[in-house]
Structures are given as C-alpha cells and as structure tokens.
C-alpha cells in the first residue's frame, strides 16, 4: 500500500480520517503540534504517542512531501530554495527578510498554465498542481534551512503557479496555516495572490479572513488581454464588479492590487489616472512592481524618473500606493523570475 502524506490533511480532516481507522480523534491534534508547531517529522520522536501507534502510523503515513535541492542566498538577505517533490519535480520558495517581518513566498503549481507574457514561470508551461502537503512543506523545509536564524512571520502565495487554479489544495493549506494547533499564523499574515479566477475568489475568502492580492497590471482590457491572457475570460469589469460585490472585501481587508510597471506598455500617466476610477468602490492598496527582467521576456522596467512620476500621479488620485523594492534579483528570486534557472545563475 502506498503511504499517504499527513500534511495533505487539515487538522479537521485528519481527525475524520483517524476516526475511520479507529484512532482517537485528538491524536490528529497531537500530530499537528509535532509536525507544525515543533517541526518534528520522525514518528520515533513523537513521544506522547504509544510505540504501537507510532508503528501503525508509520506504516500508513509519511510526514515529508519535499526535499531541499538547492539553497541560494542573495546579497540582500533573500533566500531562495529549490525543492524537489517525490515524483522528482522542482519548485521554488523564497524567504524575504524585512525589518519587521520575514515573509515566505510559496508556490502552488509546478509551472503555470496562464502564460502571462512578462512572467518567467508562465514561460515554463504547466506540469501539475501541488498537493496540500507540498504547499505547507515549503514552510517546513524553509524553517529547516533557516535553522532558527529567523522566524517566518508572513506567508504570501506569490510563487510559481496560480493559486486559484488549485483551489482545494490551497484552501486545505490555509486551514493548516491558520489552525492554532498547526502553524498558527494569524490569517491577516497570509496573502493569496491571483490574476483573477473570478468564481474562486469568494470561496477563497470564506476559508479564513486572509488577505487577497490581485495581479492587475493594466487599466484597459486591450492591454490586459495581452499581458494576462486570462483577462479574455474574466475581463476587468467582471473581476472588479465581483470584488465590489463581496462582503469579505472590506476596509479591514482591502485588496492589494499588484501592478508590474513595464516600459512603454502600461506606464503612461493616462494609465496612472485611469486606476482610481477603475478601482472606485473597492477598498484598495496599489503595489507597483517595476518589471524584473529575465531571458524569456523582451520587457523592461521604466526609468526611475518615469516610475516616480507614475507613483505620484496615482498617489495624487487618492489611492494608497507603494513601490515594491525588488528582492533577490542576483539569485533570480524576484517577482516573476521563478523559473528554476538556479544552475545558470550560480
Ligand atoms: N499567479 C498568481 C500568483 C503569482 S504572484 C498571480 O499572478 O497573482 C507573482 C506576482 O509577480 C504577480 O503579481 C505577477 O504578476 C508578478 N510578476 C510576474 N512576472 C513579473 C516580472 N517579470 N516582474 C515583476 N513582477 C512580475
């Protein structure tokens, strides 16, 4: 019998699965505490379980979904880990240390099917969805790499793949991340980013009061159709009306709109002026990300002066807007650069 991975289950789902096997439900809580709160993955070390139970569990279950393949450290402190799945696929996770927080950026798919024209992951094509275990094990493996050097305080689903094309595994991962017996992250410290898979946004925000980020990148359908091809299915008005409609989007939980600034494509002052009317009625924060260059795309970032002019124009319109500093570009760890090019970069 092939063994299943404990990390594929939320605490609630593991309780139910144990009950079916005649194992007391509270054992699920004990195991979650070992795996996620204490970082112990060896059944032999789970000393509050009887020897018989440990033997029974190890016959039926595994505890690790990923192994660390390679770790790269940027001069700015960013750490990128290439991780290997049991079927020998590779994904990447990035730890971004900042003054007041350490954010882990996790992947949700091997590759991505959405083919956004400026994103290196998009150029890889799509292999498969990650399992829940593979999503949460990115936290466990990065903790192992950090070995107490830093504590992961925030999580962003902004790595490889589109989270809302893998909604069931992402929802179960979020349940583990916020469960008090498991990782116990405050929901507001978890952010899921989507290009706008409209029917999945409402259900996602029902899972827990997490933050939503939306990859906007354009102010007209004509421009967005080419940058984010999924816009052809869910155009701007459909996406933004859904955000206006959802009660789970509110002042306490504004939407972070990501806007990758690309020279000559979406960086005009007219674009900047169109943003506020477009987002009217949605509690919003706009996050500008200068295009991170990579070999699969001809696009470049605008000049610093042009970025500054865009930022000022957006701010003048009354929107809250910030400029995201690019982190880890020397190890291809920045937004849109995750394409498993680690060896070439070394
Ligand atoms: N698929 C989801 C999750 C990935 S988030 C989404 O797109 O929202 C990764 C973020 O980095 C997205 O906002 C994406 O648009 C942005 N990005 C992609 N390529 C980039 C690049 N070359 N430079 C800067 N940002 C980029």
Image (tube, grey):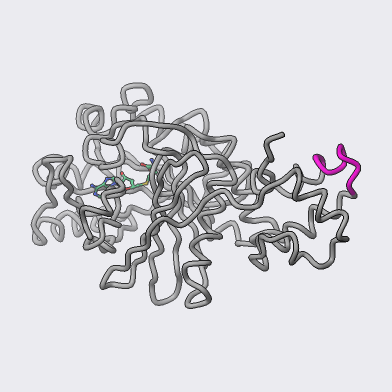
Q: Tell me: 54 left or right of 329.
A: right
Residue 180 lies, in percent from the top left, at: 71, 61
* 106 is higher (above) or lower (below) than 30: above
Q: Nearer the viewer, residue 288 or 107?
A: 107
Relative to 121, residue 200 above or below: above
Q: Toward which corner of the image does residue 26 lie, by quadrant?
A: bottom right
Residue at the image point whose x is 30% and y is 55% from the top: 318
Look at 8% across and 61% down and name the residue there. 305
Q: Quadrant of the N terminus?
A: top right
Number of dots carrying numbers? 0
Q: Main secondary structure of the magenta part?
A: helix
Q: Is residue 314 above or below residue 207?
A: below
Query: Residue 84's spot in the image, x, y percent?
Result: 45, 48
Residue 101, quarter of picture: bottom left
Point 27% across, 44% down: residue: 275
Nearest the viewer among 323 and 291 is 291
Q: Nearer the viewer, residue 83 or 112?
A: 83
Percent position (x, y) of residue 254?
Answer: 47, 51
Tell me, yes or no, whether the highlighted magenta stretch contains residue 121: no
**For this rendering, which residue is in front, 210 or 162?**
162
Seen in the image, is 26 located left or right of residue 191? right
- Residue at 52% across / 51% down in the picture? 66
In the image, the segment drawn in magenta is 16-23
Quadrant of image for the C terminus: bottom left
286 on left or right of 154:
left
Q: Position of residue 287 (x, y in %)?
A: 32, 54
């Amino acid at each position: 019998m092939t063994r299943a991975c404990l990390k594929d289950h939320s605490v609630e789902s593991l309780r139910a699965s144990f009950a079916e096997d005649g194992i007391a439900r509270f054992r699920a809580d004990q195991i979650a505490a070992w795996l996620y709160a204490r970082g112990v993955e060896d059944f032999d070390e789970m000393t509050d379980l009887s020897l018989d139970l440990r033997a029974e569990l190890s016959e039926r279950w595994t505890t690790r979904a990923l192994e660390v393949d390679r770790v790269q450290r940027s001069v700015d402190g960013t750490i990128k880990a290439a991780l290997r799945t049991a079927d020998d696929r590779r994904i990447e996770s990035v730890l971004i240390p900042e003054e007041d927080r350490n954010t882990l950026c996790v992947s949700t798919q091997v590759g991505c099917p959405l083919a956004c024209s400026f994103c290196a992951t998009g150029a890889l094509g799509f292999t498969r969805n990650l399992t829940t275990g593979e999503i949460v094990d990115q936290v466990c493996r990065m903790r192992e790499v950090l070995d107490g050097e830093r504590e992961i305080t925030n999580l962003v689903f902004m790595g490889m793949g589109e989270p809302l094309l893998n909604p069931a595994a992402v929802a179960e991962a979020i349940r583990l991340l916020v469960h008090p017996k498991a990782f116990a992250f405050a929901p507001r410290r978890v952010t899921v980013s989507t290009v706008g898979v409209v029917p999945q946004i409402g259900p996602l925000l029902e899972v827990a009061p997490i933050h939503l980020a939306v990859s906007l990148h354009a102010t007209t359908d004509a421009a967005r159709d080419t940058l984010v091809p999924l816009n052809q299915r869910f155009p701007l008005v459909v996406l933004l009306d859904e955000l206006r409609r959802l009660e789970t989007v509110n002042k306490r939980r504004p939407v972070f709109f990501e806007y990758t600034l690309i020279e000559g494509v979406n960086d005009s002052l007219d674009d900047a002026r169109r943003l506020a009317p477009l987002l009217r009625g949605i509690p919003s924060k706009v996050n500008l990300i200068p295009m991170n260059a990579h070999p699969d795309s001809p696009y470049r970032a605008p000049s610093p002066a042009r970025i500054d002019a865009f930022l000022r124009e957006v701010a003048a319109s009354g929107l809250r807007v910030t400029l995201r500093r690019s982190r880890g570009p020397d190890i291809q760890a920045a937004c849109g650069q995750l394409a498993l090019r680690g060896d070439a970069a070394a």
